[in-house]
Image: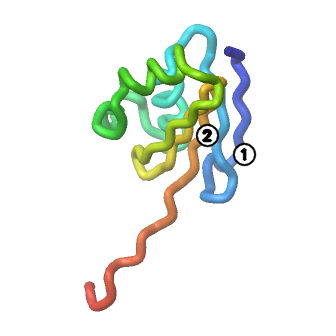
Amino acid sequence: MTDFQNHDADGADGDTPFVTERKSSETTVEAILRSVATITGVDETELDPLYDAVAVEALTALVDHGDRSVRVTFGYEGHTVVVDGDGSIRIVDDPPRNPPAGSD
């Protein structure tokens, strides 16, 4: 994989995804954590465990050893994470949810 990273200056804004590829020195999981930490402005150690959002071993097996056409999508830390078999990772803010009618 390359060390390519491309995102808008404001991070993921709901319209513009944060796009990155796994660096040659990191795993897919490390790339996801690095990217979400960058977007949210918090240290990686302050993020919820990734295994609470996705089966990490399965994700790693699919992306690292699977078909290039594979795509895994899951929610994590208020974002939608999309990992493609080519190693690219896109992260987009989840839209805010409207409260149910009649709730305060």
Residue at the spot of label 1: 8
Asked where in the image residue 56 lies, by quadrant, the reply is top left
Q: Secondary structure at mark 2?
A: strand
Counting other residues with Cα less than 10 Å from the Cα at mark 1, is it few (<14), some (14-19), or many (20 or more)? Answer: few
Asked where in the image residue 53 lies, by quadrant, the reply is top left
Query: Which colour scheme appears in the figure?
Result: rainbow
Counting other residues with Cα less than 10 Å from the Cα at mark 2, is it few (<14), some (14-19), or many (20 or more)? Answer: many
* 4 or 9: nearer the viewer: 4
Describe residue 9's horizontal placement relative to residue 40 as left or right.
right
* 104 or 20: nearer the viewer: 20
- 8 vs 101: above or below: above
Q: Residue at x 66, y 37 (%)?
A: 19
Mark nearer the N terminus (2 vs 1): 1
Quarter of the image with the C terminus is bottom left
Image spot of residue 30 (x, y percent)? 47, 21
Per the rendering, the mark at residue 78 is none
Q: How many labels sit on residues?
A: 2
* Amino acid found under the numbered disc labelled 1: Asp
Q: Residue at x 31, y 37 (%)?
A: 48
- 10 vs 50: above or below: below
Describe residue 19's horizontal placement relative to residue 56 as left or right.
right
Q: Nearer the viewer, mark 2 or mark 1?
A: 2
Image spot of residue 75 (x, y percent)? 42, 47
- 21 vs 53: above or below: above
Residue at the spot of label 2: 90
